[in-house]
Image (spheres, rainbow, N blue to C red):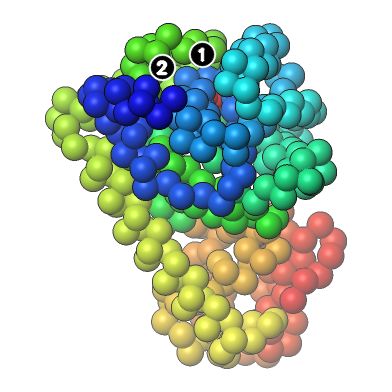
Amino acid sequence: MISRWATVARSGSAQGLSEALASFSPGLPLAVALSGGADSTALLVACAEKWPGQVMAIHIHHGLQAAADDFERHCIALCAQLNVPLAVKRVDACHASGESPEDAARKARYAAFGAVVREEWAQHAIKDIAIAQHADDQVETMLLALSRGAGLPGLAAMPARWERGGITYHRPLLAVPGAPLRAWLAERHVPWVEDPTNTDEQFTRNRIRARLLPALAESFPQFRETFARSARHAAQAQALLVEVAQQDLVLVGMPPAIKALQALSPPRQANVLRHWLLQYGARPSAAQLEQLLAQVAACTTRGHRIHLKVATGHVTRTGAVLHYTAAGIMAS
Ligand SMILES: Nc1ncnc2c1ncn2[C@@H]1O[C@H](COP(=O)(O)OP(=O)(O)OP(=O)(O)O)[C@@H](O)[C@H]1O
């Protein structure tokens, strides 16, 4: 197995994958999130070769599209061939009103990952899960963020590593473009399932992949590296903003005192208010935040009333402080 990996690693298509895997050192045993598409198929094969007997796979059956059974069949066959234990979990990924089907599927998927490693595989004490987004996915995510007018959290795109619910998630392929992963699988005659919706240009991400990425490659051949560098800069700056917001929240207090807010510069007020609201899951739009800042600035008399819609709730003034009320519950 090792010599086969080394032979393939010398070919151009495998270069990125072998380099990415060389610097990837998760806790073991490792679970790989296997959709059955090319990227996660390549990640699973590469991980199973690198850590024989210490890799498992999780497949989530969303039941969202007719091809879901094909994905499941592929995952079962691949894992049997690799001798990798596989857990298949069925989820009901119905989306709530106001939520996109993709977001609902993503949420259901992460909840199911947690359930598998904590419940079904409790005896293996798995603490690490690898998912297979790659360099092209990262660029698409940044372009999507730009198209929505996102701020730093959006431009920071996808982190290479993060923790949720006691599990460390890894994205070891963020420096590897999509094409070499497919070429690597093709060289080794490993099949994968093509998601039929990936070519549907009704979806913005698919339009970005089909039209913008080739144009970027033509004009800026290094775009994947430079976009990745920008994402890292944005992530670092965002981490700093969170630190400043945490310190400022101590200064202004909980609930935030209007006088203390007024003593901060407007960008710091915006930063700390965004941070405060996020604790209730409320993400103000740029216009709502601007209005809130204007109201805080104008709040110089006892009688000045503040009652502003923010996300699904309201920010109101009660005496010297602000409150956030979400779905009828007052938070402070
Ligand atoms: N149904 C699923 N079951 C398990 N893991 C999944 C599933 N769907 C996605 N993932 C994981 O999340 C990553 C990103 O998902 P996304 O839908 O963007 O990719 P994909 O088009 O399915 O790509 P891939 O070719 O990697 O399978 C996948 O690479 C995979 O690791």
Q: Quadrant of ligand 1?
A: top right
Q: Residue at x 47, y 20 (%)?
A: 38
Q: Position of residue 280 (x, y in %)?
A: 70, 63
User: Given this view, does label 1 or label 2 mark the residue nearer the observer?
Assistant: 2
The residue that appears at 72% across and 69% down in the rendered structure is 324
- Of callouts 1 and 2, the N-terminal one: 2
Ligand 1 within 8 Å of disc 1? The answer is yes
Residue 140 x/y as whole percent: 39, 34
* Residue 162, above or below 198: below
Q: Amino acid at mark 1?
A: Trp
Residue 82 at what x, y percent from top left?
57, 21
Residue 185, numbered label = 2
Where residue 218 sits: x, y (%)?
16, 25
The disc label shown at residue 192, or none: 1
Q: Is residue 204 above or below residue 126?
A: above
Q: Quadrant of residue 71?
A: top right
- Identify the secondary structure beneath mark 2: helix
Which residue type carries mark 2?
Answer: Leu
Q: Is residue 162 left or right of residue 257?
A: left
